[in-house]
Each structure stands twice: as structure tokens, then as C-alpha cells.
Image (spheres, helix red, strand yellow):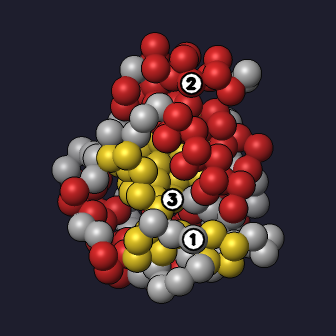
Amino acid sequence: MKALIPIANGSEEMEAVIIIDTLRRAKWDVTMAGLTNGTITASRGVKLVPDATWDQIHPDDFDVLILPGGFGGTEALMAHAGVQQALRDFTAEGKWVGAICAAALALHSAGILEGKIFTCYPGVEEKLPSNVQPVNEIVVVDDHLITSQGPGTAFEFALKLIEECSGPDLAATVRAGLLL
């Protein structure tokens, strides 16, 4: 599986790093793409060095598009025309899309949450319209959309991505190696 994870200043570092690390343990080809050039300063000040910039990649080359949360990073994902178009394209093509924490707002801004069952960080629902509201579950799968709540659910989210996209046996192997 080829996974694309866009990050920006203000992205939640635990979510980004846990997801990337867990997927790489499953031997996925994961690309962390910065929305700007250079090092990204995540939400708690951790510096992350992307594998590439968004402008250097072609989203259609990937099987899965995964958005980490963090309000600053989510705002950047919402404002980025390329990310927004990729979300719509992946959804239209039946490719997997994942989002954790506040990144549900980026899904909504792309117009792909209406009619979906999803979850997000508690409180984010206040920024969503009344007809688009999350359920209070750690990880939710609805068709090819996988969502999760936040930093503490990042392992379960990544393992569910592996389970859905690569099978339960690989997810179980990765889980065992993580001692979860």
C-alpha cells in the first residue's frame, strides 16, 4: 500500500508520527508530504522533516490519503486546494481516506462528510453543521472512510487502516510487535 500523509505547521505530531511509524511497520510505502518547503513545526513544537513537498508528489499515485489532526495543521489542510481536491478525488474513486482528531474539519471542507458516520476529537463537532455530527467512538469505518478521535487513539487508528487495507493478519502481527 502507498500512503500519503500531508502535514503542515501545527499538525499534531503524535498522530502523524504514530501513524507513519505503525504503517511502515506493516511495510507500507508512506510519504509524509509537507504543504510548505522545509521543516514543519508541529503543534507542540516538535520539528518534522517531510519526505517531500506536496508539489513534488502526485496524489493519484497513492492508495490511501491520511490526515493527521492538530488545529493549525487542519486549517492548512482546509486551505490547501491540492489536498481538498485529492480528498474529493480519492472519495470519488473509492480509495481509502483517513482522518484523525480535528482533521474531520478538512474532510467537511472538501464536502465528503455529509451522510457519513465518523468520529473526531471531542469539541470539533461544534465547528460542524448540525446535519454533520460525529459519533463518540475511538475509530469508525464507513465505506472507504476511516476516522479516529485523537493522539491517544492513533495506534488503534493506524492498526484499523492496516486491517481494512491489508488484512487482519498483518494488523495482528503489527499489533503484537507493538505490544498493544
Helix, strand or loop at disc 1? loop
**In this rendering, position of residue 103 left or right of residue 137:** left
Q: Amino acid at mark 1?
A: Val
Spatial distance from mark 2 to mark 1, Cα to Cα?
Answer: 25 Å
Q: Which residue is mark 1?
A: 49
Horizontal and vertical percent position of residue 165: 37, 31
Q: Which residue is mark 2?
A: 174
Helix, strand or loop at disc 2? helix
**Residue at x 68% of width, y 78% of height:** 41
Crowdedness of circle 1 by 10 Å Cα count: few (<14), some, many (20+)?
some
Spatial distance from mark 3 to mark 1, Cα to Cα?
Answer: 16 Å
**In this rendering, position of residue 127 left or right of residue 88:** right
Q: Residue furthest right?
A: 44
Horizontal and vertical percent position of residue 57: 29, 69
Horizontal and vertical percent position of residue 48: 63, 69
**Residue at x 51% of width, y 59% of height:** 67
The image shows residue 75, relative to residue 118, as above or below, that is below
Kindly indicate whether the residue at mark 3 contacts the one at mark 2 (C-beta within 8 angstroms).
no
Helix, strand or loop at disc 3? strand
Quarter location, residue 69: bottom right
Q: Which residue is mark 3?
A: 67
Q: Amino acid at mark 3?
A: Leu
